[in-house]
Amino acid sequence: MIRPEIFKANDIRGVFTGPEVEWDLDGARAVGAAFAVAFELDGAEFVMGRDMRLGGPELARAFAEGAAGQGASAIDIGLASTDELWFASGHLNVPGVQFTASHNPARYNGVKFCRAAAAPITPEQMARITELSFTTLPPAATSGSVRELDLLGAYAERLHSLVDTNDMRRLKVVIDAGNGMAGHTAGAVLSPLNVELIELFTDLDGSFPNHPPNPLEPANLVDAQRAVREHGADIALVFDGDADRCFIIDERGEVVSPSSITALIARAELAREPGGTIVVNTITSRAVAEVVTAAGGRVAVSTVGHTRMKALMAETNAIFGGEHSAHYYFRDFWRADTGMLAALHVLAMLGRAGSVSALVAELPTYAASGEINTSVSDPRGTMEQVADTLGGRGEVSWNDGLLITTDDWWVSVRESNTEPLLRLNVEAKDEATVVALRDAALAIIRKERG
């Protein structure tokens, strides 16, 4: 059983456990078969990993069975963060699948796909997988197989090769894994450094007993903020469920904007490769472009989403890219997003600086609303109402949802790629303007709440 609505723009996410499931093991087999055919893998291999979500082993096994029936053989790396799976695809130069629903609630599971060398799946391939998942496919002449491979050590070695962490001062580091996959990878990556680790929720548990695995929600950062203050730590690293995103909390227990982290890493990468290109998305802070320009770099702007960011990274040969959601992309990591590599960059900078807050204080300052999510019954109609109300005050673009811009502020309202939500973001030169624009947009959006 599988419902069409679980197929998203770039991946699959649906309720897999508990009542009202949207797909089951038979559905997973169908998707595995569809993937093998869409990627033309008869007689070839792909790599697969999974996070700690409930039903993950059974899901992976069923998917592999479906793929094997179409002649595809799986290299099973077992428990892995999503960026470890991207590494495996690049390291082995084969297509990959990661079984995860990222930051969605515990009852969800899903699949992320990539082509060989961690290249993003194309819209045409995603459409083909969707179509073939509802098609009865004849079996291949020869079935595929499954072999196991442990790549955690090689993954850690690759990350260490990309950041100079020598000569760091001793750091006290809080890590909040949220019972997700950072609990699996952090020890291998961070333990060799000159750090004292204070671990929160590093036991793998797909029921997420401590807090949901979504660091975009401020409530899910409170434990790490408290730990920084209680332990006098230099920094906290907060990961989402599949550990491809990392949020930073400074030594005061204050959350650092992902745009600020993007600016800091961009500046460091441009020092290594002057004149390089940095990719941002349409709702990244303007501070990033100012920092990149001052450092002699070029900025390329992508629409939101990891497949689009990766595609533009390849098109422009960008050295680095960052999104407001704390996805960070590195050319030398097959242009893939990795929260752990971003964390290493920040730790390396901090190890040679006084504090995180001092690093951030060097950057241009803008006021921002943060991302505000609302479920509405008519997303497009709601965005058009916001455009009718605020659009006359600035330049309107529909390239990535609704974006209204002026020299002094911008307002973005767009549909989520992964959830039935509208996402509002506002940035301006001062807090009063942010509050006024935020409240004006929310008055319309919440009136149309579903």
Image (cartoon, rainbow, N blue to C red):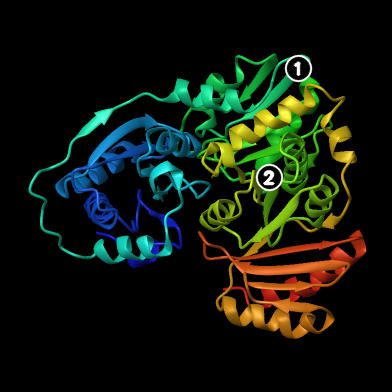
Read off the residue under disc 1: 168
Residue count near mark 2 (Cα–Cα under 10 Å), binned few <14, some 14–19, many ≥20: few
Q: Secondary structure at mark 2?
A: helix
Separation of marks 1 and 2 at Cα, in angstroms: 32 Å
Residue 211 at least partly seen: no
Residue 27: x %, y % from top left:
25, 55
Residue 119: x %, y % from top left:
45, 48
- Type of amino acid at the residue the image marks with label 1: Met
Residue 229: x %, y % from top left:
80, 27
Residue 184 at least partly seen: yes
Residue count near mark 1 (Cα–Cα under 10 Å), binned few <14, some 14–19, many ≥20: some
Answer with the quarter of the image where residue 165 lies: top right
Residue 266: x %, y % from top left:
73, 42
- Type of amino acid at the residue the image marks with label 2: Ala
Read off the residue under disc 2: 219
Using the image as rendered, state which of residue 45 and residue 234 is in the foreground: 45
At 51% from the left edge and 41% from the top edge, which residue is drawn? 334
Would you place residue 35 above or below residue 362 in this image?
A: below
Q: Quadrant of the N terminus?
A: bottom left
Which mark's residue is nearer the viewer, 1 or 2?
1
At 34% from the left edge and 58% from the top edge, which residue is drawn? 20
Would you place residue 75 above or below residue 192 in this image?
A: below
